[in-house]
Amino acid sequence: MVEGDTLGAVEAWVGLGANLGDRLDSLRSALKAIAALPGTRVLRVSSLYRSAPVDAGGPDYLNAVAQLETTLAPEALLMRLQEIEHACGRERPYRNAPRTLDLDILLFNDQVINTPALAVPHPRMYERAFVLLPLAELAPTRVPAQQLAAVAAQRIEQMQDAGWSHV
């Protein structure tokens, strides 16, 4: 591991999504892979949500948010998440393309990060119901009511169990 890749344990919030292939299996596999990352624990996971693509076409997404505790630095966590995406067949042919797996760092402690590789808080999270609703389910104080109201017209549905609670 490169110097600076780890730090004391911090809280990170990761958005998970998939709209190609076996979406549920991809999200389950991703959670297992995240839990296996060095110095990382999955603390809680939201319900599963089905949402329409935003600014894109393709099938509906399955989405969730996970709360992590990690000793990985933000850039190291991003690199590991991208490795998990790649292992699940993620391709990036164009912006907002349909995907087998999408993992985004939404929040990293209360840090504001703005580098060429990583922006935290995630720059579009407050525009996306598929991020805000699962995040609000786990941490209501992190999602102001006016931001939830701003995405209320986006099509999203909380899934009832769907086998997800057994992850």
Image (tube, rainbow, N blue to C red):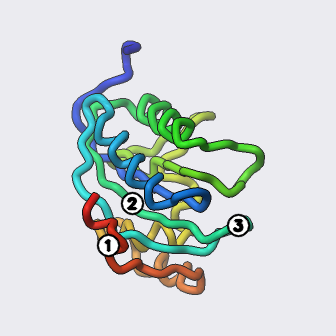
Q: How many marks?
A: 3
Residue under numbered circle 2: 65
**Which of the marked residues, 1 or 3, is nearer the chain's N terminus?**
3
Cα–Cα gap, marks 1 and 3 = 26 Å
Give SS at disc 2: strand
Q: Which quadrant does the N terminus fall into?
A: top left
As drawn, 43 above or below 114: below
Residues at badges 2 and 3 in contact (C-beta under 8 Å)? no
In the displayed structure image, the side of residue 98 where residue 147 appears, left or right: left
Give SS at disc 3: loop
Kind of residue sitting beneath label 1: Glu
Q: Which quadrant does the C terminus fall into?
A: bottom left
As drawn, 103 above or below 146: above
Residue under numbered circle 3: 58
Kind of residue sitting beneath label 3: Gly
Which residue lies at the image location 37% right of the left edge and 45% below the top edge?
A: 108
Residue under numbered circle 1: 137
Which residue lies at the image location 51% right of the left edge and 60% below the top edge?
A: 23
Kind of residue sitting beneath label 2: Val
Q: Nearer the viewer, residue 80 or 87?
A: 87
**Which of the marked residues, 2 or 1, is nearer the chain's N terminus?**
2
Q: Nearer the viewer, residue 88 or 48?
A: 88
At label 2, counting other C-alpha atoms closer than 10 Å, the crowd grade (few under 14, some 14-19, many 20 or more) is many
As drawn, 65 above or below 53: above
Which residue lies at the image location 33% right of the left edge and 68% below the top edge?
A: 163
Cα–Cα gap, marks 2 and 3 = 21 Å
